[in-house]
Image: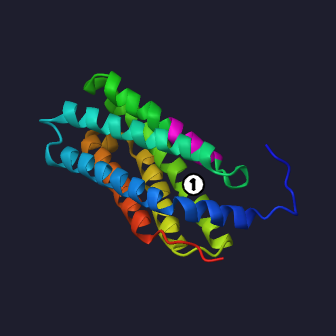
Amino acid sequence: MHVYDARYDYQGAFVDRWNTRIKKTRVTLAVLGVLLVAAGGLVMAAPYGMYVFAQAAAGIALIIQGAGHVFSYFDTPEFFRSTTRLVSGILNVVLGILFLALPVFLTAGTLVFLLAFLFILTGAERLSFAHHMRYFELPNASVCTVTGVINIVLGVVFLLMPVVTTVVLPYIVAAYLMVGGVSLLIEAISIKRIDK
């Protein structure tokens, strides 16, 4: 990690990087958001009859989202990196691999706890990002705050009610994918260039 240099313009470097990548970021967020909402819709439409297919689709979507979080962590300037984003990405990849590798009857109980921790970590990452947005006076920090709080509340509920959560796991997966997809779509729409 680099030592903090008071003479370096961290804010200017962040703004320049943000502005040069905004169009690519907007498209990437929108595509990922649509994929996550579609995967959630598939799970919601046929929670039991097509559970294996939905489990595979959710696994693939989680691996893609997790890989995106990991790459995003390493692509972010060191001063702005959030370790929770890296951990969240790794958990998403692990969760996705579990969805793809394990039979349905084994995954239900284990995935409830993984989803709970994933929700909590994702919420913490969203709150951290919202704090950075407010610090640099970027617009729409409240959207990140709201999605962060929702994720943390859902994670705590999953931890407190694991049996109920296991029974309704297909709907939980659908909600997770849809909330994640909708929040990515909201971010894609609300991203704006930063004027210096």
Report the residue at 26% width, 27% height from top: 104
The colour scheme used here is rainbow
- Quarter of the image where the N terminus is located: top right
Outermost residue toward the front in this view: 20
Q: Quadrant of residue 92?
A: top left
- Quarter of the image where the C terminus is located: bottom right
12 in magenta:
no
Q: Identify the main secondary structure in magenta.
A: helix
**Element under disc 1:** helix
Report the residue at 43% width, 61% height from top: 26
Q: In the rendered image of this protein, does residue 47 appear above or below residue 151?
A: above
Q: Is residue 9 left or right of residue 52?
A: right
Mark 1 packing: few (<14 Cα in 10 Å), some, or many (20+)? Answer: many
Q: Quadrant of residue 125?
A: bottom right
User: What percent of the width, then of the height, locates residue 124?
Assistant: 57, 54
- For the residue marked with disc 1, what is the amino acid? Ala
Whether residue 191 is visible, yes or no, is: yes
Outermost residue toward the left in this view: 49
Report the residue at 18% width, 42% height from top: 47
Magenta segment range? Answer: 83-90
Task: Give whichever of 160, 53 is nearer the camera.
Answer: 53
User: What percent of the width, then of the height, locates residue 193?
Assistant: 53, 72
Q: Which residue is mark 1?
A: 124
User: What percent of the width, then of the height, locates residue 16?
Assistant: 64, 64
Q: Quadrant of residue 58?
A: top left
Q: Is residue 70 left or right of residue 26?
A: right
User: What percent of the width, then of the height, locates residue 168?
Assistant: 26, 44
Whether residue 175 is visible, yes or no, is: no
